[in-house]
């Protein structure tokens, strides 16, 4: 077992001829929090979605916990993995979306148990008790039988985090988890994320919350137009940016 | 409005004069229509009696709509049997239509161009030709394909050999024709439902490691049902009446049954009324079922589910009593 959880080498991705990722290198150590920052359209979300194969990267090497994402290397050839193998890979990576994407037809408790029972084959009662534990952890005891539409945005996002955690992921991806929230609800979600970071979860967070990045992240990557402009310790990079682009970006968001 | 300082301000609702007049006119027309339905008219004959040596004659009057004949045939065994056949045809055709329609919709949204094009062509053909033509086609299928053989294609190996004339009875042909036709429409209804579900839902399911099938079954389809159901209710009701086309090919369903009766006794209108009343009764029952199904699948989509008709009546009663009581209190207040 290496200490590297996610390793990207020269990852490229185009949509209809437009190159969104132009050769990205990234390395995330086990147990670390990495923040991806940058202007919208810079490719942060695309990179994140490539890591759990929601998007297929065109070329380059992308490994999670040593395994190639979406491919299998045998001899000198790369074989595309079949759907079942890709599902198994995804089940080990939790993802939290900007717009929560809680299953609208299921209660809070069912949202958290369905992955465990249908994907991992966990027994229903065990799944429920785990779901209750996780709800307590994100501060939402007593909301088990509510439907997502009955919760505030902040509560929904916390349920979404619990839903992802229920799968016992080895890596958590957050795609702008607080961007769709009212300002006064951002704090409660960031609190849960900080708690998760303290517990030693490996996390990659696409965010515009510079304070969160500075406080919690071990490493920050600044993406612009599909390339990584600058990266390093947030206390250095965000305070004393060396590239002009990061300087101008920070002057706009801070 | 009261100028007393200690009294709460009253809200006086606007009087909608136009609505009242419109409502009164509508009620008048309804009363007139109902009156004509149940009026009696002279049938041109006179009946004469001699009582105590005095002979008196009266014109004979009959129900304009021959209700006596309607009631006579309403529960006759031919009509009830026809009704049963209609219900069977509707149910079987809808089952085929729904199952095949969902498969076609999923094919249509598949990443495989070949599957998608196949589904598109199916819909194109079955929506593009009249259902009556399709019915007649299936009735005559034996002339085109005298037998069905289950075996290995393009070889002489056969496992099962069936004679079409024995399978394609009028009833079976009608079920096949109506079911295949419905599938074309239902696939479009299902597709619209699937498209209406936010893409984020299937993305979230995928990110949990669910397969495409699991995501459809547990997440996307249940939410699509909310969009699909009202239209499905429409389709069932429409199918109920479309089954009457099968009477043209000798299936004795509801319309076929009353046709058989009036071709003997020439009481065309009363017997068509018999059929219409039965269609209305079944439609009403289906509409009630649709309401409760829609309520069930609205789970999670609405913060508060819509009230059932009984709950609505109770709420109305409470509202009216409250209004009445407040009016009473108001009057007491102003008279004091």
Image (cartoon, coloured by chain):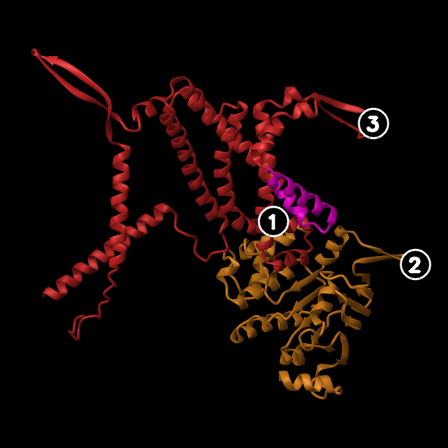
Chain colours: A orange, B red
The kind of secondary structure element at disc 3 is: loop
Q: Where residue B247 appears, x then y in whole percent? A: 51, 26
Specify the farthest residue to the right.
A76
Residue extent of the magenta highlight: B101-129
Q: Is residue A40 left or right of residue B89?
A: right
Residue at image position (92%, 56%) is: A75
- Residue on which disc 2 sits: A76
Q: Quadrant of the N terminus of chain B?
A: bottom left
Which residue is at the front of the view, B148 or B52? B52
**Quadrant for the C terminus of chain B in the image:** bottom left
Is residue B112 one of those drawn in magenta? yes
Q: Are marks 3 and 1 on the same chain?
A: yes
The chain under label 1 reads: B
- Report the magenta stretch's main SS: helix
The residue carrying mark 1 is: B191
Q: What secondary structure is found at the residue carrying circle 2?
A: loop
> Could you tell which of marks 3 and 1 lies nearer the N-terminus?
3
User: Separation of disc 2 and disc 1 at Cα?
Assistant: 43 Å
Q: Nearer the viewer, residue A238 or B284?
A: B284
Residue B212 coordinates in the image, percent (x, y): 68, 51
Q: Is residue B146 above or below residue B177?
A: above
Query: Which residue is pictured at 62% across the width and 47% down the height?
Result: B217
Residues at marks 3 and 1 touching, judged by CB atoms closer than 8 Å? no
Residue A27's image quarter?
bottom right
Q: Chain of mark 2?
A: A
Query: Residue A3 appears at what percent x and percent y?
Result: 80, 69
Q: Residues within 10 Å of mark 1 (few under 14, many from 20)?
A: many
Q: Chain for mark 3?
A: B
Q: Which residue is mark 3?
A: B155
Tag 3 near tag 2, CB within 8 Å: no
């Amino acid at each position: 077992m290496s200490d590297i959880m996610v390793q990207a080498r020269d990852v490229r991705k185009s949509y209809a001829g437009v190159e969104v990722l132009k050769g990205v290198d990234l390395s995330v150590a086990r147990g670390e929090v990495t923040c991806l920052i940058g202007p919208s359209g810079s490719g942060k979300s695309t990179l994140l979605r490539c890591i759990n194969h929601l998007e297929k990267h065109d070329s380059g090497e992308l490994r999670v916990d040593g395994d190639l994402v979406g491919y299998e290397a045998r001899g000198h050839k790369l074989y595309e993995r079949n759907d079942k193998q890709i599902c198994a890979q995804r089940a080990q990576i939790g993802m939290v979306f900007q717009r929560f994407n809680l299953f609208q037809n299921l209660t809070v408790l069912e949202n958290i148990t369905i992955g465990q029972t249908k994907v991992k084959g966990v027994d229903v009662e065990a799944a429920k008790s785990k779901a209750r534990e996780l709800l307590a952890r994100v501060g939402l005891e007593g909301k088990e039988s509510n439907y997502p539409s009955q919760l505030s945005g902040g509560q929904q996002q916390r349920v979404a985090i619990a839903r992802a955690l229920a799968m016992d992921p080895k890596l958590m991806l957050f795609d702008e988890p607080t961007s769709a929230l009212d300002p006064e609800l951002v704090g409660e979600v960031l609190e849960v994320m900080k708690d998760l970071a303290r517990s030693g979860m490996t996390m990659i967070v696409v965010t515009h919350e510079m304070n969160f990045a500075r406080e919690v992240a071990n490493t920050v990557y600044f993406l612009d137009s599909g390339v990584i402009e600058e990266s390093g310790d947030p206390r250095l990079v965000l305070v004393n940016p060396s590239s002009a682009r990061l300087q101008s970006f920070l002057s706009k968001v801070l | 409005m009261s100028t007393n300082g200690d009294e709460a301000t009253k809200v006086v609702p606007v009087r909608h004069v136009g609505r009242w007049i419109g409502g009164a006119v509508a009620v008048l027309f309804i009363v007139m229509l109902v009156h004509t339905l149940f009026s009696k008219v002279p049938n041109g004959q006179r009946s004469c009696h001699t009582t105590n040596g005095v002979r008196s004659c009266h014109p004979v009057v009959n129900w304009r709509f021959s209700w006596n004949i309607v009631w006579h045939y309403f529960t006759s065994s031919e009509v009830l049997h026809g009704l049963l056949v209609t219900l069977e045809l509707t149910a079987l055709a809808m089952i085929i239509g729904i199952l095949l329609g969902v498969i076609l919709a999923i094919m249509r949204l598949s990443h495989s161009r070949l599957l998608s094009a196949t589904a598109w062509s199916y819909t194109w053909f079955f929506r593009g030709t009249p259902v009556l033509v399709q019915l007649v086609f299936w009735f005559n299928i034996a002339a085109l394909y005298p037998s069905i053989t289950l075996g290995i294609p393009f070889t002489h190996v056969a496992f099962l050999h069936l004679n079409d004339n024995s399978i394609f009875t009028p009833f079976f042909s009608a079920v096949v024709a109506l079911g295949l036709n419905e599938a074309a429409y239902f696939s479009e209804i299902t597709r619209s439902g699937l498209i209406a579900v936010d893409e984020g839902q299937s993305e979230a399911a995928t990110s949990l490691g669910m397969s495409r099938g699991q995501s459809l079954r547990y997440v996307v389809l249940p939410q699509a049902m909310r969009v699909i159901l009202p239209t499905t209710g429409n389709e069932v009701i429409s199918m109920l009446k479309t089954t009457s086309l099968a009477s043209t090919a000798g299936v004795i369903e509801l319309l076929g049954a009353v046709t058989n009766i009036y071709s003997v006794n020439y009481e065309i209108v009363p017997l068509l009324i018999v059929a219409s009343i039965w269609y209305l009764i079944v439609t009403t029952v289906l509409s009630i079922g649709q309401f409760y199904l829609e309520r069930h699948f609205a789970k999670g989509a609405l913060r508060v589910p819509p009230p059932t008709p009984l709950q609505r009546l109770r709420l109305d009663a409470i509202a009216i009593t409250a209004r009445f009581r407040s009016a009473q209190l108001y009057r007491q207040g102003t008279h004091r």
